[in-house]
Image: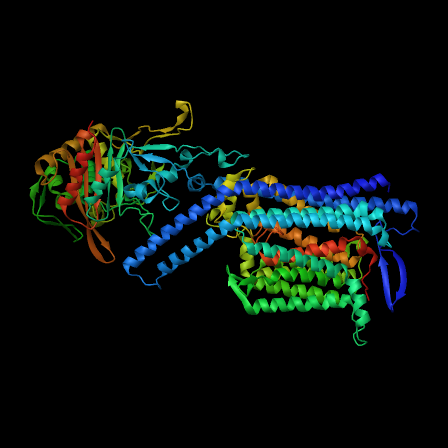
């Protein structure tokens, strides 16, 4: 590669990151400018509601109703709710600015980090040449980071329209931190293994990092599922949440990350592969039992992709060397899926309900479709966002459609482009070590299924599965798990990874 | 080629296999032509993924757009009102606002006629929603291209206060009151009690003028009289001895002992015995034909629904298979299986007075769209008067003459205003939940203002009450 070419690719990588940062700042300024009057009107609305409910409370007092009366309870609850909402609205611009500043920081630090890495890499590199880094890895990583940053920024902006608290910001920092930890663990797995080996007792000398990355997820998945079944808190008719110290956690989201690590580390051993596929099957069944059709579908797609990769001639692995076994497993998986759909009526009902949302005007998909119609291609705009504030799960399960309804089709296009960058970049080339290719392809399929189900489920084209949009939707568990996935992908994309094999015994 | 093993070595008693397929990591010993081929394959593979990503984006966007486009058909008047807070304005005949935003204050007596939401289907707003809202959607701007001024629906109804005055005279009894001008078709009032209350969960959704049928009581005798006059059977006198025994042994009771009376006397005194004998003398086929012409559904025959300004009303029904059977006689006297719709009865009465034809009732004078600049484009809907011919002019004239004579000479008109030219009261016995109840009904015509009316007060047998409603109505009507 010529020297000038090197410079171009370097510049290209930087350009992507800088453009992302500019986009994020523009989005922030635009939204703050537009948000102020909306906030004001919403605070006024809350105040008028509070006075209404206070008046009716006085009336109840005159009538002599005691505190146990349902009307009194309801009115008091509403007064409290709106008071809290006013507090939140007063704080939200501050929270929003801080969150956006955080995202800009991530992008800037990432750019700086990449630059330093590239500059100093050559000296330390043994296997990989600078040409490879500049021509191949650098723009790829930059594009992925930029897409990630833009999606996070859009997500924060979108959530701010409906609700954002300082707690969300903490969650954001935590999620990115978790992602970084996953990145470190995954990238440095061979180093960690080598270090461990030096200190390890003779007894455990045979245990490798691959073993740890296999057994921990299996135990983790089974434990998360058991905890979810035993201590599940019912909310919206399904038991997907467990409550810890005032906040709720959705274990199903972490199951996905653990399964990705499990699938990847099962590379090389037949029995491990079979165990991981069966663990996934168990997770699928338990999640369907807990009425989480969406995550069940994601896990099903993950297994199918794992099996499909076996049939690819150029990517023949050593997990299943027997092709007949792969085809048998695939047929079994599909049968399993069909039987599970037949067994769980709530899952079947959702599938049967597709296409007739408008006939029941109360359904949230119908409300969303109306919002999309009223918005047109340009969207409702921030000033009309009050129209959709009452749609249930507007900032989680209907995030992509809601985003389109507010900002228009242009924003949808940006979001989908960002998603496709994150989806395509990890699987574009088979240049990675297979174990990492497993992980990267699983992340891609999770993103594909989640994006499609979220975008088309909420407009009544596919079954509405209550699945979140990656990086955009509200929900700490999902954000943490997706940041972890990005960490894994970044680790697999890192140029050094190619030179560092994880031992496959 | 499945994969290439580029390096094998033994370190720490472990086999480390290094496998790479990318051209980037092509080992140095791979020849030049192979390198090129691999590069081509790799580029192909990359494009495959990029194309897949584009297909993903396109399918999501197209899927959403197609679904949203299909959903446009389901958008209702209420949806648009919920979005831009602009509802139609509805006025009475004096341009006074009677409905603006569906709120409780602007709702009162018109509730179940004007309608709100999908709960009241047979209502003015629901049936005319396409005219009351903008239906041109701008695909680029969505519904932000909506109008800024409300469309105005001017109705023919009397003012809210006067209708409320009438409703107050019902004294918390259920019932309905319909009055319309039989020359122009303008409906003056069509309220129904109990009225619709949007704040109540199980509120009354039905407008009884449109959607109900009643047992007619003696008001049915006007219909029977038309049949008799048409067949020339009105000249004979019959004897009334307080009750009349049919050949089957069943007895028809009368309101009193009337002796030998004439046709006009029988109408005036509402004599059941006279009418029983009169009905037995009628010809079945001719009667069936005339009843059909009058718009009755005879023997459960299905008739097309009658529409007035898109609002549908129920059809009146009579059973008539054998004119000497107890059930059929009792039906034509006004009990039994006869059911009449208030609006239909008012129309027939109007036809009798108006030479055989009566205008079809209509509620809307005009619908205008003030957003349009040109005056001719502002008008969306205007009322047209159509006439229905119920009977021949001669028959109508003859019947009207008998009815008038009966009202003038033989009717007990204590408490009824002079303005009411024709009237026929009725009392219907209704069995509800095993308890016998009486409904009071009044069919009448006020010639000075060309108005026909039908009033029903449920669970009441007080004639003064229903007369007071009719008197009030006659005062409130606009005189031509």
Q: Nearer the viewer, residue A429 or B419?
A: A429
Question: Which quarter of the rendering shows the C terminus of chain A?
Answer: bottom right
Residue A17, position in %: x, y?
Answer: 71, 44
Q: In which quarter of the image is residue B91?
A: top left
Question: Which quarter of the rendering shows the N terminus of chain A?
Answer: top right
Residue drawn at 86 percent across, 65 percent down: B15
Residue A207 in sight: yes
Above-or-below relation of A375 to A176:
above
Q: Count the marks: how many?
A: 0
Residue B305 in sight: no
Q: Which of A71 and A79 is in front in this view?
A: A79
**Furthest-bottom residue in view?**
A203
Above-or-below relation of B180 to B109:
above
Residue drawn at 35 percent across, 41 percent down: B123
Q: In which quarter of the image is residue B167?
A: top left
Residue B111, position in %: x, y?
Answer: 31, 43
On the rendered structure, is B34 left or right of B430?
Answer: right
Residue B94, position in %: x, y?
Answer: 27, 31
Above-or-below relation of A316 to B222:
below
Residue A436, position in %: x, y?
Answer: 76, 57
Q: How is the image coloured?
A: rainbow
On the rendered structure, is B200 left or right of A37?
Answer: left
Q: Which of B294 and A396 is in front in this view?
A: A396
Q: Nearer the viewer, residue B184 or A478?
A: A478
On the rendered structure, is A71 left or right of A272?
Answer: left
């Amino acid at each position: 590669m010529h020297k000038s070419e090197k410079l171009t690719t370097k510049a290209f990588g930087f350009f992507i990151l800088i453009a992302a940062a500019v986009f994020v700042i523009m989005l922030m300024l635009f939204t703050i400018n537009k948000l102020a009057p909306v906030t004001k009107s919403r605070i006024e609305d809350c105040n008028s509601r509070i006075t209404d409910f206070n008046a009716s409370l006085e009336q109840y007092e005159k009538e002599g109703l005691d505190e146990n009366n349902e009307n009194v309870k309801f009115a008091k609850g509403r007064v409290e709710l709106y008071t809290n909402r006013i507090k939140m609205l007063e704080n939200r611009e501050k929270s929003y600015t801080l969150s956006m500043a955080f995202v800009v920081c991530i992008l800037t630090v990432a750019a700086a980090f990449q630059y330093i890495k590239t500059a100093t890499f050559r000296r330390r590199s043994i296997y990989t040449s600078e040409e490879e880094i500049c021509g191949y890895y650098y723009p790829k990583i930059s594009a992925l980071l930029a897409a990630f940053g833009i999606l996070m920024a859009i997500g924060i902006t979108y959530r701010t329209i409906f609700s954002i608290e300082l707690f969300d910001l903490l969650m954001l920092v935590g999620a990115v931190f978790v992602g970084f930890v996953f990145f470190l663990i995954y990238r440095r797995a061979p180093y960690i293994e080598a270090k461990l080996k030096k200190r390890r007792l003779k007894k455990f000398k045979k245990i490798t990092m691959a073993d740890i990355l296999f057994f921990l997820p299996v135990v983790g998945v089974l434990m998360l599922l058991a905890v979810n079944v035993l201590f599940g808190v019912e909310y919206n008719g399904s038991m997907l949440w467990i409550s810890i110290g005032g906040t709720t956690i959705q274990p199903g989201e972490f199951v996905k990350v653990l399964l990705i690590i499990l699938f990847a580390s099962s590379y090389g051993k037949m029995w491990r592969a079979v165990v991981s596929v069966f663990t996934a099957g168990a997770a699928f069944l338990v999640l369907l039992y807990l009425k989480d059709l969406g995550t069940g579908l994601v896990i099903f797609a993950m297994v199918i992709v794992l099996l499909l990769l076996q049939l690819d001639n150029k990517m023949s692995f050593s997990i299943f060397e027997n092709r007949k076994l792969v085809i048998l497993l695939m047929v079994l998986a599909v049968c399993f899926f069909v039987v599970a759909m037949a067994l769980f009526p709530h899952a079947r009902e959702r599938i049967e309900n597709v296409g007739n949302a408008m006939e029941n005007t109360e359904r949230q998909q119908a409300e969303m479709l109306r919002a999309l119609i009223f918005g047109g291609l340009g969207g409702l705009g921030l000033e009309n966002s009050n129209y959709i504030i009452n749609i249930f799960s507007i900032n989680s399960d209907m995030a992509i459609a809601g985003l389109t309804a507010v900002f228009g089709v242009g924003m949808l296009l940006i979001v989908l482009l960002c998603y496709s960058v994150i989806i395509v970049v990890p699987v574009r080339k088979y240049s990675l070590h297979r174990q990492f290719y497993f992980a990267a392809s699983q992340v891609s399929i999770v993103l594909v299924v989640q994006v499609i189900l979220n975008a088309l489920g909420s407009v009544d084209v596919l079954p509405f599965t209550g699945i979140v949009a990656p990086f955009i939707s509200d929900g700490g568990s999902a954000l943490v798990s997706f940041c972890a996935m990005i960490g894994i992908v970044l680790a697999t994309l890192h140029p050094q990874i190619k030179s560092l094999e994880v031992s496959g015994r | 080629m499945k994969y290439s093993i580029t390096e094998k070595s033994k370190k720490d008693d472990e086999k480390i296999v290094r496998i790479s397929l990318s051209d980037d990591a092509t080992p140095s010993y791979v020849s030049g032509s192979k390198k090129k081929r691999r590069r081509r394959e790799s580029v192909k593979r990359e494009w495959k993924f990029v194309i897949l990503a584009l297909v993903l984006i396109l399918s999501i966007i197209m899927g959403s757009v197609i679904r949203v486009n299909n959903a446009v058909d389901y958008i209702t008047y209420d949806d648009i009102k919920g979005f831009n807070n602009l509802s139609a304005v509805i006025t009475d005949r004096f341009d006074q606002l009677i409905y603006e935003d569906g709120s409780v204050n602007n709702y009162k007596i018109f509730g179940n006629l004007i309608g709100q939401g999908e709960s009241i289907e047979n209502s003015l707003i629901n049936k005319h929603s396409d005219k009351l809202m903008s239906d041109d959607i701008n695909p680029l701007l969505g519904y932000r291209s909506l109008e800024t001024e409300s469309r105005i629906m001017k109705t023919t109804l009397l003012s809210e206060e006067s209708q409320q005055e009438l409703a107050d005279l019902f004294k918390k009894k259920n019932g309905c009151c319909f009055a319309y001008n039989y020359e122009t078709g303008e409906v003056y009032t069509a309220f129904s009690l109990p009225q619709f209350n949007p704040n109540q969960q199980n509120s009354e959704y039905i407008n009884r003028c449109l959607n109900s049928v009643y047992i007619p009581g003696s008001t049915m005798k006007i219909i029977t009289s038309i049949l008799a006059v048409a067949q020339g059977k009105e000249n004979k006198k019959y004897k009334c001895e307080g009750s009349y025994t049919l050949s089957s042994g069943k007895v028809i009771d009368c309101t009193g002992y009337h002796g030998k009376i004439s046709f006009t006397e029988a109408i005036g005194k509402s004599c059941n015995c006279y009418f029983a004998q009169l009905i037995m003398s009628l010809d079945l086929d001719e009667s069936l034909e005339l009843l059909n012409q009058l718009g009755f559904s005879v023997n459960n025959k299905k008739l097309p629904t009658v529409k007035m300004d898109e609002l549908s009303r129920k059809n009146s029904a009579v059973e008539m298979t054998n004119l000497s059977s107890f059930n059929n006689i009792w039906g034509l006297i006004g009990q039994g299986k006869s059911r009449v719709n208030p609006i239909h009865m008012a129309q027939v009465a109007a036809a009798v007075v108006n030479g055989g034809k009566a205008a079809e009732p209509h509620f809307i004078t005009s619908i205008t769209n003030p957003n349009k600049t040109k005056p001719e484009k502002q008008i969306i809907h205007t009322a047209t008067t159509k006439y229905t011919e119920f009977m021949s002019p001669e028959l109508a004239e003859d019947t009207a003459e008998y009815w008038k004579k009966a009202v003038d000479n033989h009717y007990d008109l204590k408490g009824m205003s002079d303005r009411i030219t024709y009237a026929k009261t009725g009392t219907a016995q209704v069995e509800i939940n095993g308890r016998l109840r009486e409904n009071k009904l009044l069919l009448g015509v006020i010639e000075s203002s060309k108005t026909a009316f039908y009033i029903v007060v449920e669970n009441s047998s007080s004639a003064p009450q229903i007369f007071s409603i009719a008197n009030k109505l006659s005062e409130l009507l606009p005189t031509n």
